[in-house]
Amino acid sequence: MDKNSNAAALYRGSCLCGAIHYEARAEIKAASHCHCSMCRKAHGAAFGSYGSVPVGSFAFIRGAELLKRRESSPGVTRTFCPECGSPLTWHSEHGDAAAWMSFSLGTLDTPFVPAKALRSIHAGSAPAWYAAGEARKD
């Protein structure tokens, strides 16, 4: 993405402590809840919620030099803030996925209302204590 572009960002996000900020200048595609063990551990939750935009439309606009990167599996890199631990992105170098940058929907600072319900992927890996689609309302 051209950082000098005058186009307004469609979406902005940041980590918990505010040290790292990003912009996504495209509609979010493939929004999902991933139940694989790597996403669960990266997020410390039953799943990680991600949305994807073309790689060229995503940019870190503040704190990029602070980012920590970890290869979670061959050719798959995750980024996170070293100060607060917020998981920020997931990117694969393999096949069609290489054209997309996936980012944690929970880090968005601007509203995102998906056109349809987020799908669950790797649901077979969901922990036994999580019943997909069920939430207790207190």
Image: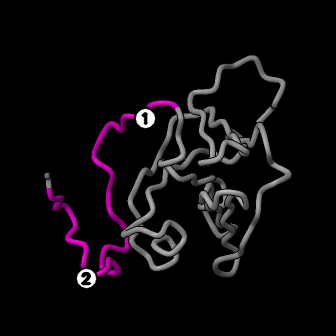
Seen from the viewer's position, the closer of residues 105 and 85 is 85
Amino acid type, mark 2 = Ala
Q: Give the residue number, with chain letter if any, for mark 2.
A: 128
Amino acid type, mark 1 = Phe
Element assignment for label 1: loop
Horizontal arrangement in the rendering, residue 99 relative to residue 34 (left or right): right
Seen from the viewer's position, the closer of residues 58 and 95 is 58
**In the image, residue 54 lies at what x, y percent?**
63, 45
Q: Give the residue number, with chain letter if any, for mark 1.
A: 112
**In the image, residue 75 lies at what x, y percent?**
70, 75
Q: Residue at x 25, y 82 (%)?
A: 128
Q: Main secondary structure of the magenta part?
A: loop
Q: How many marks?
A: 2
**Membership of 127 in magenta stretch:** yes
Q: Residue at x 78, y 22 (%)?
A: 5
Highlighted range, magenta: 110-136
Q: Residues within 10 Å of mark 1 (few under 14, many from 20)?
A: few
